[in-house]
DNA sequence: TGTATTTTTTAAAATCATTATCTTTTGGTA
DNA sequence: TACCAAAAGATAATGATTTTAAAAAATACA
């Protein structure tokens, strides 16, 4: 945890940004809720619990900054809000998501399943892949079991 | 063109929706701009050219309806607006996109490259895949050529 | 150490896409 | 024709995000 924070601090410094207390509080919330997919508002409310002075605009600015530095990925699951997802330690590519259309749960796949597909895209479409976004929509294990019962 | 329109008309009727003149005008615009990725506002302005009486709310309502019927897919490339993309004739899955981070162009891949990956997801994660979203971010052919020159 | 300069934050207002509401129109049916 | 439901039109409301202006904090440097 402290290690990840240090790493992020260095990433900020390398672009001559500072890790202000507000930014640190925001990053800590993201680290503490890594499994979730928080909206800006969610982050704001959680940060506020420990640092009530912080403003929503600051949270937005911080998330935007972290996004530019590729520390978080800004995603959109189709409801009206952007969600912010920490990159996994050392990951070059964004991880994949499994969104259940029954219960709305979101599962993560950290393993990169797109190696072969990217090769095809690079050779057949002459497109130099830098990153990707992959989401599957379907039915999660739990919801399948529920269906089987009924 | 007329053929696609007929098909869509049938899809609407099968759910007991009507193809009203406003809906037809909207669908025609989508068909005429299939290669683009239009926002609701874009669609509205184009529909207005031929049917000036139409209201923005109607366009939104129509796009929402087409979305529910899986005739169009609602996508989000990270700018603040939703974009609407016609499904390819007879396609079960949403097609893929190549977004250039240099020039912003968007290329489409109609071929489904995810067959193997979906099999892995179904067996190893026990997730029943119904649809997917795949976007690659990188450098398009044209922008690569520009780089080579300089 | 003191002061000018720059960065960051705050609070509030503005923006802008989308949705909701309310009224009117349309098209079918008894 | 009179009635009803679905759809459209007009416009207000909502809600996420951005912008602005002023204050505070950090930094540079004489
Ligand atoms: Mn995730
Ligand atoms: Mn497309
Ligand atoms: Zn589920
Ligand atoms: Zn390009």
Image (cartoon, coloured by chain):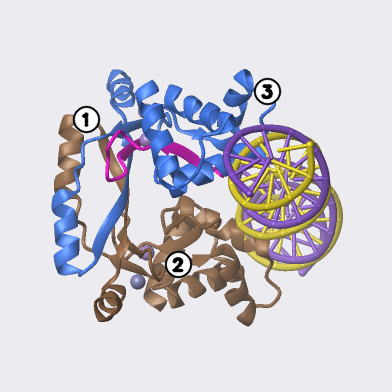
Chain colours: A brown, B blue, C purple, D yellow
Q: Is mark 3 within 8 Å of ligand 2?
A: no
Neighbor class of circle 3 (other Cα within 10 Å; few <14, some 14-19, many 20+) is few
Q: Position of residue B78 (x, y in %)?
A: 49, 45
Please tell me whether residue B99 belongs to the stretch shown in magenta. yes
Q: Is mark 2 within 8 Å of ligand 1?
A: yes
Q: Nearer the viewer, mark 3 or mark 1?
A: 3
* Quarter of the picture holding the C terminus of chain A: bottom left
Residue annotated with mark 3? B52
Rounded to the nearest angstrom, the CA distance separating label 3 from label 1 is 40 Å
Neighbor class of circle 2 (other Cα within 10 Å; few <14, some 14-19, many 20+) is many
Q: Secondary structure at mark 1?
A: loop
Q: Is mark 1 within 8 Å of ligand 4?
A: no
User: For residue A125, which numbered disc appears in the image?
Assistant: 1
Chain to which mark 2 belongs: A
Residues flagged by tags 1 and 2 on a common chain? yes
A12 to B124, vertically: above or below: above
Magenta segment range? B79-100
For the point 29% across and 70% down, which residue is it?
A: A140
The quarter holding residue A128 reads top left
Residue annotated with mark 2? A37
Please tell me whether residue B82 belongs to the stretch shown in magenta. yes
Q: Quadrant of ligand 1?
A: bottom left
C29 to A69, vertically: above or below: above
Rounded to the nearest angstrom, the CA distance separating label 1 from label 2 is 33 Å
Q: Position of residue A149 (x, y in %)?
A: 26, 81
Q: Secondary structure at mark 2?
A: loop
Rounded to the nearest angstrom, the CA distance separating label 3 from label 2 is 42 Å
Q: Is residue A53 visible?
A: yes
């Amino acid at each position: 945890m402290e290690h990840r924070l240090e790493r992020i601090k260095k990433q900020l410094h390398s672009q001559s940004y500072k890790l202000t207390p507000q930014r640190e509080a925001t990053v800590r919330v993201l680290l503490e809720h890594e499994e979730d997919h928080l909206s800006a508002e969610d982050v704001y409310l959680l940060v506020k619990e420990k640092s009530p002075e912080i403003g929503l605009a600051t949270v937005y600015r911080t998330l935007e900054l972290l996004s530019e530095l590729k520390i978080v990925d800004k995603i959109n699951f189709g409801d009206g809000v952007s969600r912010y997802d920490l990159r996994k330690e050392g990951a070059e590519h964004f991880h994949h998501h499994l969104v259940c259309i029954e219960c709305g749960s979101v599962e993560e796949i950290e393993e990169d399943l797109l190696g072969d597909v990217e090769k095809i895209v690079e050779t057949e479409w002459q497109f130099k892949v830098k990153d990707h976004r992959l989401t599957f929509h379907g039915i999660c294990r739990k919801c399948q079991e529920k269906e089987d019962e009924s």
